[in-house]
Image (cartoon, rainbow, N blue to C red):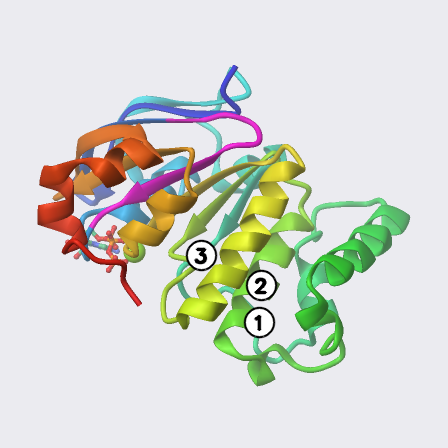
Amino acid sequence: MAVLEAQEVTAGYGDAVIVERISVKVEAGEIVAVVGPNGSGKSTFLKSLLGLVRRFCGRILFEGRDITAFPAWRIARAGIGYVPQVNNVFPNLSVVENLQMGAYFRQDKGGIQADCSEILEMFPELKRRSRFRAETLSGGERQLLAIGRALMGRPQVLLLDEPLAFLSPKTAALILRQLAAIKERGIGLLLVEQKTFLALEAADYGYLLSEGRCLMEGRGSALLADASLRERFLGLRKEV
Ligand SMILES: Nc1ncnc2c1ncn2[C@@H]1O[C@H](COP(=O)(O)OP(=O)(O)OP(=O)(O)O)[C@@H](O)[C@H]1O
Ligand SMILES: [Mg+2]
């Protein structure tokens, strides 16, 4: 059973439909990428799964359970982690405080402490700076912190909005290695990315969005090999 499944989701803002009939499946321990150019509706789609934008129709299943009608706070507590595209850390709080914020709905103090230590072990870049304010971190460190904060909610599935944006190739590779490590823990990952090549290379399965519709789907490697997709969206080269 898929850990998260969107069935024919149509969503947008006010009366405006932005994404139409999008169906996506994420299994446990799998990386799924939704790729597409600027404005294709990637963030809107992700937010539609989180109850953050208006949904016109479609269903969302989490571990087989219909959560379509759940409010955003209940979706977060159910086990769906979210790393937003912007403003994803609290700049004035320290690294450790940011991580603790990710556990805001948990009561198990000991567990929170243990998870915080574990995440700092996973991300040595953060451990070195655990007492520093988040605003002093580099872009890559901030992204790791945002991912760590989301992990503090103990999600079964993690939704990431352009985790590779604005990062150097070296830092993007570091983030992708960490995402692979998270996948190894059996967590499902759904990332939306504009860096099509890197995302599909890392993904087990991918979907291509264009103007709010899904044009193509398939194994990451199969999409990468697709000539028409390469021509239209990949520019036949790896982005930097
Ligand atoms: N709050 C909003 N109200 C109205 N329209 C919006 C809102 N947010 C986004 N849109 C519109 O929805 C469309 C898709 O935007 P979205 O942010 O989902 O695209 P995206 O694929 O995430 O783009 P990017 O790669 O630049 O992040 C755009 O035309 C945008 O103008
Ligand atoms: Mg976006």
Residue sitting at 50 percent across and 64 percent down? Answer: 88
Q: Residues within 10 Å of mark 2 (few under 14, many from 20)?
A: many
Looking at the image, tell me whether mark 2 or mark 3 is earlier in sequence order. 3
Depth check: give the residue in front, 35 or 156.
35
Which corner quadrant of the image does residue 217 belong to?
top left
Q: Is residue 207 left or right of residue 102?
A: left
Q: How far is disc 1 from disc 3 in space, using C-alphas?
A: 15 Å
Q: Quadrant location of ligand 1?
A: bottom left
Task: Judge by depth and name the residue closer to the eye, 171 or 81.
Answer: 171
Which numbered marker is on residue 84?
Answer: 3
Residue 144 numbered tag: 2
The answer to whether 134 appears left or right of 13 in the picture is right
Residue 34 picture location, percent across and down: 32, 41
Is residue 70 placed above or below 189 in the rendered structure? above
Helix, strand or loop at disc 1? helix
Report the number of numbered marks.
Answer: 3
Q: Which mark is residue 141?
A: 1
Give the side of residue 212 with respect to residue 1, left or right: left
In the image, is residue 110 part of the stretch drawn in magenta? no
Do tag 1 and tag 2 residues touch (Cβ < 8 Å)? Answer: yes
Task: Say what amino acid the circle numbered 2 marks.
Answer: Leu
Mark 1, Cα crowd under 10 Å, few <14 / some 14-19 / many 20+, is many
Give SS at disc 2: helix
Query: Which image quadrant: the C terminus?
Result: bottom left
Magenta residues span 25-36
Q: Is residue 4 above or below residue 37?
A: above
Element type where label 3 sits in the image: loop
Q: Which residue is drawn at the image coordinates 67% and 37% (left, top)?
A: 185
